[in-house]
Every structure is written in C-alpha cells, then in structure tokens.
C-alpha cells in the first residue's frame, strides 16, 4: 500500500528491483500506488476502483488512461444519442396530449397512445456496451437497459418526478466529474519583481559543537555535524524550485529554514518585504487537526477555518474548501475522521485563505491518489505564485517543469541540476 511513500531515489530503485525480482519468479504483486512512473514501468494490469465497482484493464497506467478515455467518450456519445431519442419521444407524447379528443371513445384511445409511448420512453437506454457491441437482452441477462428509467429502483421511482427520473437515468450513464480531485489555487498578488526568498551562505545541523571541525570530502570542505553549509539559493517570483536528495540529507530542514520555521546556525534567510509564505507538510496537516480538536469532539473543517479566519464569510470558506475537493458533507464532518488526503486538502485550504505568494511544500503528493496528484499538478501549473518543494515523485516534478537542485550529503552543498529530474535519475543508473 503506497510503497513509494517516504522513499528517496535509491530506495525507489531498490523497490523496483524487488518487484522485478518477484516478477521473474512468477510472484504476483498487488499494490496501491500514486507513482505514475512506477506503474508505467512495472504494471502488467490495472484495476480501477470507482463508484463501488472494480474495472479491469490490461497494461500499465498509460494504457489504462487510453482505454478509460475511450470508454468515457463512448459513454458520452451514447448518452447524447439517448437524450436525443428521449426528447423526441417526449415531444411525441406532448403532441398526442395536445390533439383534440374525439367524442366517442376518444379519451381511452388517446390515453392508450400516451401509455404506449410512455412505456417506450421508460425502456429507452444505452444501445451499445463499452466495447461497442449492441445490447442484447439474452446476453445481458436482463430486460432493463442501462440508463433507462426502469433501471431506477422502484422505491426511488415512487418519490421522483418524471424529470428527476430522466436525470437519474442520465447520471447512471455519463461519466461523473469528480470534484473531489480538484485543487484550485487562487492567484497571488504580484508586485515585487525581485527574488522573494534568498538564502545567503546558510549552514545548519543539530547537536553541533560551538567550534565544529571541518572535514574534506571530494576536495570540498564541510563542517562536522552540519547537514549542509555554504548554501546559496535565490527563489525568483513565479518560479518553481524542487530540492532533491537522499533521506536524511537535510531537504526538509532547508525548507523549514526557507519558511523561517527555524533559524539557521550560519548565514541568513532574506524574504522580500511583505511577502506571505505558506508552509505545508503532512506533520503540519496533522498538527492543524490535533490543535483544532483541543478536547472538542465536534470540530469540522468548516468550524475550524471559520475560527481561524473570523474576517472571512462562511461562503468564502465553503468556497475554499470546495476548491480543494472537500464538499459540503466533508466540510461538516468531524475532523477526527478525515483521511490523510483530506487532511492535506484541509491544510492547503487553510494556507490559501492567508493569500500566500509563496508555497513551500514537503512531499505534497503523499496520501494522494493518482487522479489527485494529476489535479494537483494542474492546479499548481495554473497558479501564478511561487513554489518551493521537496518531492521524490518523478512524474510530479517532471510535469511542473521547475528548477531542480540536490543536496549532496557527503559534501553538504546544494548543487543545481541543469538537466532536471531525468538527468538526476539517469545519474543513478550509471554503473
């Protein structure tokens, strides 16, 4: 279950080798993952779980999205054709009702004509399955077509009007847009025209002595006990910066320094005047929830954000929650029962209500599924703010097309990677 979480590149390579070894020994591997590169490279089949249904697709994630897009397009076309037939039949029924009723037995005959057409309308459904084969009652094992009014259970039909029944039938056919995967970042104010964050000769570590000795690695001097030193970094307005490196090299520490959550032992972090920075990691998301509870058993995302931002209207806060995929029902849910992904969304909504110009994010794709990661990529690419992040998700980094830097743990220095994430990954494949 999400085996790539918290793994650095070396760990990811070892995981791939393990899975490949299992495949060579004909061992079946079943996993849940949001790592698109891993799925594309290793998966032989994809099982898609949606709307309480499992759907099976041969191939990897790339193949799955191709099949899925074709199926969605097919069902949309089928739905359009069904709507056209229904509208024509509804118009026919209305025309019959408007016709003058003959004096002798005309009412019964007219009612029969309306009834026959009404029953035809109720039976109308999808004529072809997902593979394009024509629907057959014998093969389907039922006389009720998908998307028909008759497909709605009898108990629900009694409570719904004719118009509501038609809509219920349509929703059982057309692909349902999932608002739970959206990430809408409101545009940031842009007035600086200069670097928003500058790190100047920064060094940091934990448990460091007052006069640390220096060690030389690869002819580069590093202070003993320091995670890194002599770090210079300029984060331009509107840029996307990704910091890479092995676990324990100091990536998360550097992010906390840039967000001024900690002060460096050496050097200086300078922020542009008036800039607002939003800092995100999973620990922050968990602490936001834990601090909000404070012994209360009924804290909800809506009540939490309303207490934190009293100057905002309830409509504004509901809109922010919806923008990050938390619908009205989730907004009123006890936050104790939010999943890791929902807590992340709540944390992002909380950050964006403070109107940050800079987001600093530590492993933002943890606890998100593939569709949510894709939505996060889209949301961040549409945003005009500045992003600094740590991530090991190669597809996520590649899609955002930002500048890449790596902390070299032996040297304790921050180096630029001109070739980006692909060049960085390739460096591990050189034997």
Image (cartoon, rainbow, N blue to C red):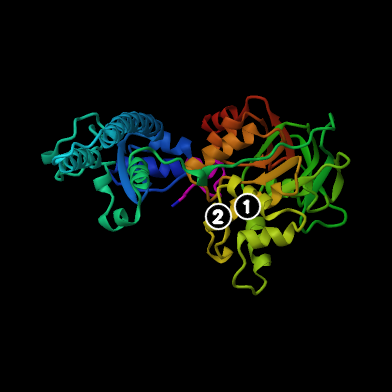
> How dense is the environment of label 1, judged by Cα within 10 Å: few (below 14), some, or many (20 and up)?
some
Q: Choose top left, top right, bottom left or bottom right for residue 300.
A: bottom right
Quick check: can you spot residue 223? no
Depth check: 206 or 385 in front?
385
* Rendered location of residue 377, percent (x, y): 58, 36
Q: Residue at x 53, y 29 (%)?
A: 430
* Rendered location of residue 11, percent (x, y): 52, 45
Q: Choose top left, top right, bottom left or bottom right for residue 105.
A: top left
The reply to whether the magenta stretch includes residue 322 is: no
How many marks are shown on the rendered structure?
2
Quick check: can you spot residue 206? yes
Relative height, residue 285 to residue 240 (above, below): below
Q: Horizontal placement of 99 versus 284: left or right?
A: left
Relative height, residue 199 to residue 32 (above, below): above
The residue furthest left is: 138
Q: Are marks 1 and 2 in contact (CB under 8 Å)?
A: yes
Badge number at residue 328: 2
The residue furthest front is: 103
Badge number at residue 230: none
**Magenta-drawn segment:** 2-13
The residue furthest top is: 419
Label 1 residue SS: helix
The reply to whether the magenta stretch includes residue 9 is: yes
Depth check: 336 or 315 in front?
315
Q: Earlier in the sequence, mark 1 or mark 2?
A: 1
């Amino acid at each position: 279950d999400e085996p790539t979480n918290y793994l650095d590149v070396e760990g990811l390579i070892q995981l791939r080798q393990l899975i490949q070894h299992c495949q060579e020994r004909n061992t079946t591997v079943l996993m849940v993952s949001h790592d698109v590169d891993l799925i594309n490279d290793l998966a032989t089949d994809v099982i898609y779980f949606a709307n309480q249904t499992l759907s099976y697709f041969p191939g990897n994630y790339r193949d799955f999205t191709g099949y899925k897009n074709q199926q969605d397009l097919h069902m949309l076309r089928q739905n359009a054709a069904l709507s056209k037939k229904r509208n024509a039949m509804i118009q026919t029924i209305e025309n019959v009702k408007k016709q003058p009723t003959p004096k002798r037995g005309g009412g019964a005959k007219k009612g029969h004509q309306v009834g026959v057409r009404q029953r035809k309308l109720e039976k109308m459904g999808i004529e072809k399955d997902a593979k394009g084969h024509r629907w057959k009652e014998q093969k389907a094992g039922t006389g009720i077509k998908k998307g028909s009014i008759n497909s709605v259970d009898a108990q629900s039909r009694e409570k719904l009007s004719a118009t509501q029944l038609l809509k219920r039938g349509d929703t059982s056919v057309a692909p349902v847009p999932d608002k739970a995967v959206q990430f809408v970042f409101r545009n940031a104010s842009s007035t600086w025209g200069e670097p928003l964050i500058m790190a100047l000769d920064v060094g940091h570590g934990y448990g460091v002595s007052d006069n640390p000795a220096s060690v030389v690695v690869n002819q580069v001097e590093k202070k003993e006990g320091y995670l890194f030193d002599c770090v210079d970094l300029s984060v331009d307005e509107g840029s996307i910066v990704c910091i890479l490196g092995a676990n324990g090299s100091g990536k998360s520490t550097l992010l906390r320094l840039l967000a001024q959550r900690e002060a460096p032992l050496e050097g200086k972090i300078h922020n542009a005047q008036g800039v607002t920075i939003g800092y995100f990691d999973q620990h922050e998301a968990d602490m936001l929830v834990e601090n909000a509870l404070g012994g209360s058993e009924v804290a909800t995302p809506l009540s939490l954000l309303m207490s934190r931002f009293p100057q905002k209207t309830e409509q504004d806060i509901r809109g922010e929650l919806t923008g990050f995929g938390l619908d009205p029902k989730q907004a009123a849910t006890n936050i104790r029962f939010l999943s890791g992904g929902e807590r992340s969304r709540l944390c992002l909504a909380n950050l964006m209500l403070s109107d940050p110009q800079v987001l600093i994010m530590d492993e933002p794709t943890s606890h998100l599924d593939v569709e949510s990661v894709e939505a996060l990529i889209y949301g961040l690419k549409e945003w005009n703010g500045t992003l600094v992040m740590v991530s090991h998700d190669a597809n996520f980094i590649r899609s955002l097309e930002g500048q890449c830097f790596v902390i070299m743990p032996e040297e304790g220095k921050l180096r630029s990677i001109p070739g980006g994430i692909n060049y960085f990954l390739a460096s591990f494949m050189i034997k």
